[in-house]
Image (tube, rainbow, N blue to C red):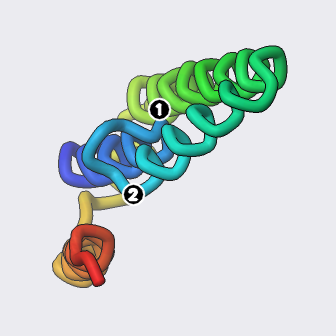
Amino acid sequence: MPNLSTIFFSFTLANMSSPGTSSFIGEFLILVGAFQRNSLVATLAALGMILGAAYSLWIYNRVVSGNLKPDFLQKFSDSNGREVSIFILFLVGGATVR
């Protein structure tokens, strides 16, 4: 399942607000504005973002590297063309700027 794990990792990075994703700009601007108004609230928000990123990596590790039984892997295949094309549409839609 290397294709699906790669797709899932890219969505995990987007959920973590990594630079280059659309959520990074939003969270960065929110933190900058919050620090100008109230540093305690901004610190708590930053802590929440860090904990959210840690949880995203934890859930990715549990889902991709969890305990898999060989009979389970034989029942299911990796991603097909339909799933890859949907991922490419998400990728193009998220990368285009209006």
Question: What percent of the width, then of the height, locates residue 45?
Answer: 73, 27
Residue at x-position 39% and y-position 51%: 11
Left/right placement of residue 17 relative to residue 20 reads right
Residue 95 vertical position relative to residue 40 in the rendered view, above or below? below
Rendered position, 90 above or below 21: below
Q: Is residue 81 visible?
A: yes
Relative to 11, residue 47 above or below: above
Figure quadrant of residue 39? top right
- Residue 66 seen in render: no
Residue at 52 percent across and 51 percent down: it is 26
Other residues around mark 2 within 10 Å, as few (<14) / some (14–19) / many (≥20): some
* Residue at point 82%, 15% (across, down): 40
Amino acid beneath label 2: Ser
Question: In the structure shown, which secondary structural element does the residue marked by tag 1 occupy?
Answer: helix
| Rendered location of residue 36, percent (x, y) | 67, 29
- Residue 83 occupies which quadrant of the picture? bottom left
Q: Secondary structure at mark 2?
A: helix
Tag 1: amino acid? Tyr
Q: Which mark is residue 19?
A: none
Q: Which residue is mark 2?
A: 22
Q: Is residue 20 left or right of residue 58?
A: left
Mark closest to the chain's N terminus, 1 or 2: 2
Q: Is residue 34 left or right of residue 66?
A: right
Residue located beneath label 1 in the image: 60
Where the C terminus falls, by quadrant?
A: bottom left
